Amino acid sequence: MMSIRIIAASLLSLGMVVGPSGLAAEGLSGAAVQVSNRDHIKIVGSSTVYPFSTVVAENFGRTTRFKTPIVESTGSGGGLKLFCAGLGAHYPDITNASRRIKKSEIDNCAENGVTEIIEVKIGYDGIVLANSRKNPKLEVSLRDVFQALAKNVPIGEGGLQANPHQTWADINPDLPSIKIEIMGPPPTSGTRDAFVELAMEGGCNTFPFIKALKGTDKAAYKALCHTIREDGVFIEAGENDNLIVQKLNANPDAFGVFGFSFLDQNIDTVQGALVNGVEPSFERIADGAYPVSRSLYFYVKKANIGQTPGIAEYMQEYISDKASGDEGYLADRGLIPMQPAEHDDWVDKINNLEPLTVD
Amino acid sequence: MPDYALNTSENTRRRHIKEVRFQWVGRIAILISLGFLALMFIAISVRGYSVFEQTHIQLDIFFDEAHLDPSGARDPEMLLIADYKPLLTTALQRRFREVQERREKRRLYKILSRGAVFALGEMVQKNPNLIGTSQRLWLPASAEVDLYMKGKVDVSLEEELRRLKNKEINWVNQLKAQGQIKKKFNTRFFTKGDSREPELSGILGAVIGSAFSLLVCFTIAFPLGLLTAIYLEDFAKKTLLTDLIEININNLAAVPSIVFGLLGLSIFLGVFHLPRSTPLVGGMVLALMTLPTIIIAARASLRSVPNTIREAALGLGASKVQTTFHHTVPLAMPGILTGTILGMAGALGETAPLLMIGMVAFIVDVPQGITDVATSLPVQIFLWADSPEKGFVERTAAAIMVLLSFLVLMNLLAVFLRKKLQRQW
């Protein structure tokens, strides 16, 4: 009985003493963090660039006197929103993006005082359409991909109908007669954006009358080319690409849409479909032959260079040959490096700290 | 004991059968749920147990002064930025003299983890006297070699479908024959923070992050919840207002946790400008979430203290505050603590609100305080599950094992408190 009372009383008093005093201290140090400069770089942005940025951040932290940057995965759009919210230690120094910054985002940045932004291109990423190795490799054209996935597909010259294709052979007799089943990322994902823009729109443009529509009615063109069917053929499988790979192993008839780095890591169980006759390989994405590839970027606040220690050095690490070069450690992780001439161009730009100009 | 006099009627027999049937349904239900639990534990353990061992390669390293510190000044700054990679390449070269071609040398070097370089750097910085000496060291192998040593590489596959090629396997087998490669206990997993190299990553950063968050959560939620419960139970008059508060507390307990995360994002980060991604904010959000649980548990156990105790204390001249703090609260404390621990266990497993306040981040350094950026255990599991590298599969499972063991420990503590300290009236 006595012991319970002692325990209870001591716990209670601990709670009461630590509670308020702890809070006061927390509040103070919280304020201090905000006023003074941070000692580490803060990075937000794309989940596609995240695996590469974290590797650079770790190497940078271990081989320099600077602290390891903190990398947060928020998605390209979310990252740019945080990035553009203002200047100062409270906001991130760098944001990753799996697409280029938009004009509206540059304007938003400028409104909040972020006027000088340095753009850094780090390389390319291929988006693959993969299936299990238990089934034969698929060979498709972008036109086939569009016809497999679009909500509405053309009928004859100029007409449209709800997508009737149930098997691959319905689209093109050369394709196997298995049910179309494609797992891919949700609309919030940058990979989905890029897939829709490159693969779907690419296939869409092979119909001359739709291509002509682009000039006359852009909204209708976009609605037609960018809308994925909702009758269960396309399955939104979430942002976790490992999960898609596992599901492909369980269902050899299904296909998955994900980034090249996941194909690279799981090459023992899944294979990428040839698109327009081109294999999704490291070399073919790098030389631009593979049609579904996009550029990856990060954006830096010029005003923060010299404020947060290490930003310039981090940029140098990222763009160095040992990281993003032809045989750099990022290539080991599945990043497709730029051609040497383009790489050199970007090195020059970064050495001069050239800010992005609105064009 | 069967009652023969009653057992004769048909009706009784049917009732008896019904009872037996019901008991069996209950047993089967328990069996099925236990089966699922066992399946989950086994599946996770089978995937995760291999993390506790890590492959290491033995090499003779010569700490060449000409490479590391040509000036001989032993300046710590210089030792930090010195290039330790050549030490490894020369050591590997001496071990495998037949490897001559440049591309092949690069491949040979990759059987070691990138962490081997960092390990050498750390050793020299700790003990600069190593420079100029030769040491026989066990260095971490790369994740791919590690998977091979653990039997997780299918050697029967065609070479081009494997990340580990025949050459590398041949080198590893040569080392194996000489006893220069072996699996050792993986201390790194328990003593380091996150890393993008599976073989270098550890769980400590996440554990400490969780511990700090829970500490903040406890220091806020426990006193607040306890005092609220005491006031509502023993002091407040029953009015419309207290009824309203009670209903709201019960409602709050049912609010999905992501909503608390959004609240934290807009209030703690947006209005108060507290530092993002820190256990301070994480703990505050979790405190909001556990507060109703604690209040409800505390009220229930205060209510279960018999009124005779209060009346006896008041009758002997104790004031109301004395009655509460000398008698009611200590007697209710085991129940209150049980409720609190269960609430904290729930908070430990929570991910959704932490996503909103930026605790999903890649953080290498182990946090030192509540205002350092940090992740937490469930978030670490989420991050590893999402990593492309195969080596993270076992790490994800192992992290789940760590999280589950903490949860089991907390629940055991709750059971212990209930069994040992609870009074029967």
Image (cartoon, grey):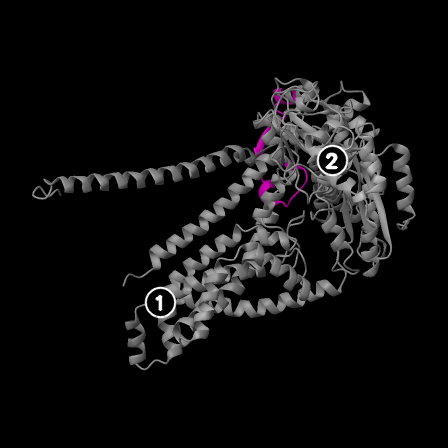
Image quadrant for the C terminus of chain B? bottom left
Find numbered disc 1 in the image and state the secondary structure of the residue it sits on: helix
- Residue type, mark 1 in image: Arg
The answer to whether residue A125 is visible is: no
Residue with the mark numbered 2: B133
In the rendered structure, does residue B34 fall within the stretch colored magenta?
A: no
Residue lying at 52% horizontally and 61% vertically, measured from the top left: B218
Image spot of residue A268 (x, y percent): 65, 24
Outermost residue, bottom side = B317
Image spot of residue B4 (x, y percent): 8, 41
**In the image, is B151 to the left or to the right of B20?**
right
Of residues B391 and B16, which is closer to you in this image? B16
Q: Is residue B24 above or below residue B272?
A: above
- Residue type, mark 2 in image: Thr
Q: Are marks 1 and 2 in contact (CB under 8 Å)?
A: no
Find numbered disc 2 in the image and state the secondary structure of the residue it sits on: loop
Of residues B42 and B285, which is closer to you in this image? B285
Sort mark 2 into few (<14), some (14-19) or many (20+) by Cα contacts within 10 Å.
few
Q: Image quadrant of residue B149?
A: top right
**In the image, is A223 to the left or to the right of A243?**
right
Q: Image quadrant of residue B220?
A: bottom right
Residue with the mark numbered 1: B303
Q: Is residue B350 above or below residue B132?
A: below
